[in-house]
Amino acid sequence: MRIQRNPDKAKQAKKQAPEAPARRRLGVAERERQILDGAIQFFSVHGFGGQLRDLAKSIGVTHALLYHYFPTKQALVDRVYLEVFEGRWREEWNAQLDNPDTPVEDKLTAFYLEYVTTTLSREFVRILVFSGLTDHTITDRFFSMLRTRLFPRLIRETRRFRGLVSRAKPSEREIELLMGLHGGFFYITMRRWIYAQDVYSEIVHEGYDEHLVRDRVCAYLNASRDLFADINRNPLKRRARR
């Protein structure tokens, strides 16, 4: 039989013991936000082959609760796409690129400096690469957006830089030259978030240096000289394309 030698002291200790704080129940929007943020981190680490049970466990919710907010895995992937990719596109970039008063070199430099800094985060880069290695669901939608919102503007500005006004469909050479510019900026972030290599500009400037961006833009615009040389040498042909 156990004998309590100092019952008063035991009662006092029990009274002084801190009570565990009551867990606040999250609202619908907060819970959805929690799941979405957790999914973005989970997919950026494990790709899209990861199981939703593991995702739910990493977030700290039940599998049933996860399905209550996102009935299918594709529904969750679609929401991640809207959040990480389309959600980071800024409408003011359209006006910035459409401004005829800004020199083309300055315009492209300002755009890509902000685009790389704002958009190409760790989650963005890794999720895009994982998608490209699996079902292409996100990569196809993302490049479709670029072909609609961005690439026509950049082709138009490149032509304007070379003194050509044309609404003709971009040639294969124009597209490939442009992809060299756009893909070059993406490769900078791949070096950091995929290959785990230091990027000199970030080490020195704690971000992407304007000179690094401008150098690439100038190289692209200089390379466009040969592409448009034959048109610029033939005024009749240039006038016909207008």
Image: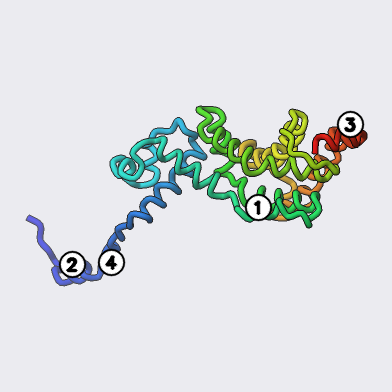
Which comes sooner in the sequence, label 1 or label 2? 2
- Residue identified by numbered label 3: 230
Q: Nearer the viewer, residue 134 or 163?
A: 163
Q: Disc 4 or 2, which lies upstream in sequence?
A: 2
Count all numbered tags in the image, as a single digit: 4
| Residue sitting nearer the eye, 144 or 186 | 144
Give neighbour class at mark 3: few <14, some 14-19, many 20+ (Cα, 10 Å). few
Give me the C-alpha separation between circle 4 and circle 3: 82 Å
Which element type, helix, strand or loop, lies under badge 2? Answer: helix
Q: Amino acid at mark 2?
A: Ala
Percent x, y of residue 106: 79, 53
Label 4, label 2: how many angstroms apart (C-alpha)? 14 Å
In the rendered structure, the answer to whether residue 225 lies left or right of residue 133 reads right
Q: Identify residue for label 1.
A: 93
Label 3–label 2 contact, CB within 8 A: no
Tag 2 residue: 10
Amino acid on which the number 1 mark rests in the picture: Trp
Q: Nearer the viewer, residue 93 or 15?
A: 93
**Which of the two discs, 3 and 2, sits closer to the camera?**
3
Q: Answer yes or no: is residue 19 visible.
A: yes
Question: Which label was assigned to residue 18?
Answer: 4
